[in-house]
């Protein structure tokens, strides 16, 4: 129940309704139905929903420990081609990548890491593909 | 690793220029009971295969140690997420794991290499005999052949069981349900049908596929061993989704089996497929559907449980000559509870199939094996496929047995019977004995014809009831030795000519003369 209210609240705020107005309308609606007790649970569900949405839209650039500068340059060139501001991208160093980079977010994964490449070779050699 | 392989790897690494590979991905938000909720993957399609990325965050050495890749099957497309079932070990999936779209619909490998092998529901070998070298991928979900590409059932499929071949004949391309309580011999009837195919000429012998769903591993191992000992594994494939396998694999196994069968059917071959059993598949599907939060219906099965079985069994058919003339004959098995055939799943499958054979506990307990109740068993299309020879000898058996059962019930109240009634009862008793058969001992068609011809001509009337099976066996062995040419002709032509009838009459006379001690009731 609270999940549906939180999703609805997220949608009407996303559609342009002022947050303050949206919340007061929700409060009135709940009061009318005698469900005001749901409000704290709706708030928690709303926070969870927001975290999820943020995670969905966040772009993460992981670069290997070796050649990090070059990897960032390559990834930034790709971001420019996609009209994404590099400030919108969270950059982390991932030593397990061996080298190269990996950009993940908004339902896409660009993997140019050495780890992927080496694993591909290993799998081909051991007939695991 | 040999030096050439090492050189190859070094060469590949030297030529490496980092290039990004773009993939459509999602993230696992919840996992439990073999089902995962995935955020993202908005472009995913129904029945698509997704790949769980287990190597993220792992060091290269550890990533290399990862077992085979773990896949999932998308079963629910929701507003902003998808739900998938894990085709493997659930404990390998964790929240936040990246899931990659593959753009592929679930397929299983199929080729002649699968013959004699045991595979799981994903078509992967599980018999320790190594991977397959060259296979063709067959989609597990495929539209059944349309009306214009089909041909009516007209070629018989001999099961080697007298009661079936005589009274409930099965044709190639038919779907005949085997239904009964637990422990009534359903699997035995099906396995005997597979074994019996060894008597078929190699060019017309059907490829047999035994799909074990939710069965004990020991039972499947026993069946595999039996088929191997009988030489039937040469033309048989076993698809195994044991009781210990995840519900998703038990649900998929019959579809994998038929997909493998379609590979052979498309090549013009005949296929016999046994689904043992669809009740367990329905239960697995119910479990999966409830976990996927689909609305439950009658007996908590989802609303599309009928479609689950109809779309599976519709794929059994006989193709027209233009399409190669191949066929898939399906023998689905359904287990009933306390003989109740009016349950949800039994009635569904009864209505889908082209006939059913009921196996009854009472008959089984009386020692009548196979325990087929011929009174309520029926084959709706098989008679068109029955050989003329079998038709000639089997015509009156069903009626005779029905009258015998009626009189047998009446006999319990009547002390004095007229001669005609007493004769009919005696004849019926002997017919029941003739139709009895041992487990794992299918009988070729020509021998069945000879035995039933003898039974229909009062040959066993002078034999004590408890000796009929033994005398029948001796008579058939006698024919095999002395009249093998005649048996061969019945097999070849499928006819019972007047000359042949005379030959069989002569054989019966000779056998009686040679073994008068067996006919001890003769006056």
Image (cartoon, grey):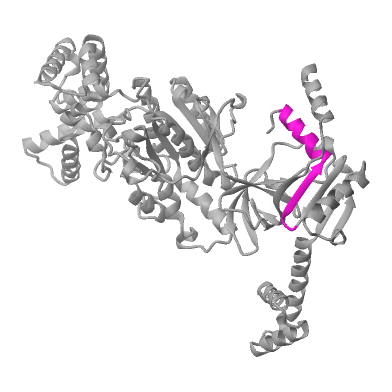
- Magenta segment includes B381: no
Position of B72 compared to B476: left or right?
A: right
Q: Residue furthest front?
A: A81
Q: Is residue A123 magenta?
A: yes
Q: Position of residue B72 (x, y in %)?
A: 63, 47
Q: Is residue B372 visible?
A: yes
Residue at point 26% right, 43% down? B378
* Position of the C terminus of chain A by quadrant: top right
Position above or below: B164 against A107? above
Residue B54 in the image: above or below residue B118: below
Q: Is residue B268 left or right of residue A89?
A: left
Q: Is residue B198 left or right of residue B498?
A: right
Between residues B189 and A37, which one lies in front from this camera angle? Answer: A37
Residue in the picture at 49% in, 45% down = B141
Highlighted magenta segment, given as a residue range: A106-126
Q: Is residue B335 left or right of residue B399?
A: right
Q: Position of residue B207 (x, y in %)?
A: 42, 28
Say which residue appears at 24% left-offset and 15% top-offset. B488
Q: Which image quadrant for residue B343?
A: bottom left
Image quadrant assignment for residue B375? top left
Q: Where in the figure is residue B332, as x and y percent of width and height?
A: 40, 42
């Amino acid at each position: 129940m609270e999940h549906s209210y939180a999703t609805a609240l997220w949608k009407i705020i996303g559609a342009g309704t002022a947050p303050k107005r949206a919340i007061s309308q929700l409060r009135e609606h709940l009061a009318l139905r005698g469900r005001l007790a749901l409000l704290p649970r709706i708030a928690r569900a709303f926070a969870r929903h927001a975290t999820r949405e943020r995670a969905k839209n966040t772009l993460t650039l992981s670069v290997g420990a070796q050649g990090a500068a070059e990897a960032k340059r390559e990834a930034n060139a790709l971001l420019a081609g996609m009209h994404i501001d590099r400030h919108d991208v969270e950059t982390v160093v991932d030593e397990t990548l061996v080298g190269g980079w990996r950009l993940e977010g908004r339902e896409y994964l660009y993997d140019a890491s050495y780890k992927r490449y080496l694993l591909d070779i290993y799998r081909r050699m051991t007939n695991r593909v | 690793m040999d030096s050439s392989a090492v050189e190859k790897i070094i060469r590949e690494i030297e030529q490496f220029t980092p290039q990004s590979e773009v993939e459509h991905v999602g993230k696992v938000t919840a996992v439990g009971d073999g089902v995962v909720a995935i955020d993202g993957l908005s472009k995913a399609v129904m029945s698509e295969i997704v790949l769980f990325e287990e190597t993220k965050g792992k060091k290269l050495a550890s990533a290399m140690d990862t077992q085979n890749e773990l896949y999932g099957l998308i079963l629910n497309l929701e507003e902003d997420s998808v739900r998938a079932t894990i085709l493997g070990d659930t404990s390998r999936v964790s929240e936040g794991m990246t899931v990659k779209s593959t753009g592929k619909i679930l397929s299983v490998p199929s080729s002649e290499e699968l013959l004699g092998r045991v595979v799981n529901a994903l078509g992967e070998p599980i018999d320790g005999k190594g991977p397959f070298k060259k296979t063709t991928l067959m989609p597990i979900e495929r539209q059944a052949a349309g009306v214009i590409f089909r041909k009516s059932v007209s070629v018989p499929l001999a099961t080697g069981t007298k009661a079936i071949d005589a009274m409930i004949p099965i044709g190639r391309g038919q779907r005949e349900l085997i239904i009964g309580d637990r422990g009534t011999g359903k699997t035995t009837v099906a396995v005997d049908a597979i074994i019996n195919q060894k008597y078929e000429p190699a060019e017309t012998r059907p490829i047999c596929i035994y799909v074990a769903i939710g069965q004990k591993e020991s039972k499947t191992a026993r069946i595999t061993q039996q088929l191997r000992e009988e030489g039937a594994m040469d033309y048989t494939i076993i698809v195994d989704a044991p009781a210990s396998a995840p519900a998703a694999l038990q649900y998929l196994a019959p579809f994998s089996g038929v997909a493998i069968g379609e590979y052979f059917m498309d090549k013009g071959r005949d296929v016999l497929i046994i689904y043992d059993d669809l009740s367990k598949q329905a239960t697995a599907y119910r479990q999966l559907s409830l976990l996927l939060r689909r609305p439950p219906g009658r007996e908590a099965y989802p609303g599309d449980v009928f479609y689950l079985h109809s779309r599976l069994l519709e794929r059994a058919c006989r193709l027209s000559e233009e399409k190669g003339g191949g066929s898939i004959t399906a023998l689905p098995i359904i287990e009933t509870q306390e003989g109740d055939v009016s349950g949800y799943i039994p009635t569904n499958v009864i209505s889908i199939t082209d006939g059913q054979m009921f196996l009854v506990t009472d008959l089984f307990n009386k020692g009548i094996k196979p325990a087929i109740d011929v009174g309520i068993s029926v084959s709706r299309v098989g008679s068109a496929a029955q050989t003329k020879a079998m038709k000639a000898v089997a015509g009156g058996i069903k009626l005779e047995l029905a009258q015998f059962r009626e009189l047998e019930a009446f006999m319990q109240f009547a002390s004095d019977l007229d001669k005609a009634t007493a004769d009919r009862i005696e004849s019926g008793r002997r017919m029941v004995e003739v139709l009895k058969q041992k487990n794992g001992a299918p009988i070729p068609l020509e021998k069945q014809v000879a035995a039933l011809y003898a039974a229909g001509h009062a040959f066993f009337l002078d034999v004590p009831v408890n000796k009929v099976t033994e005398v029948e066996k001796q008579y058939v062995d006698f024919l095999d030795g002395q009249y093998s040419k005649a048996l061969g002709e019945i097999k070849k032509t499928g006819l019972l000519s007047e000359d042949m009838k005379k030959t069989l009459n002569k054989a019966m006379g000779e056998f009686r003369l040679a073994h008068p001690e067996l006919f001890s009731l003769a006056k």
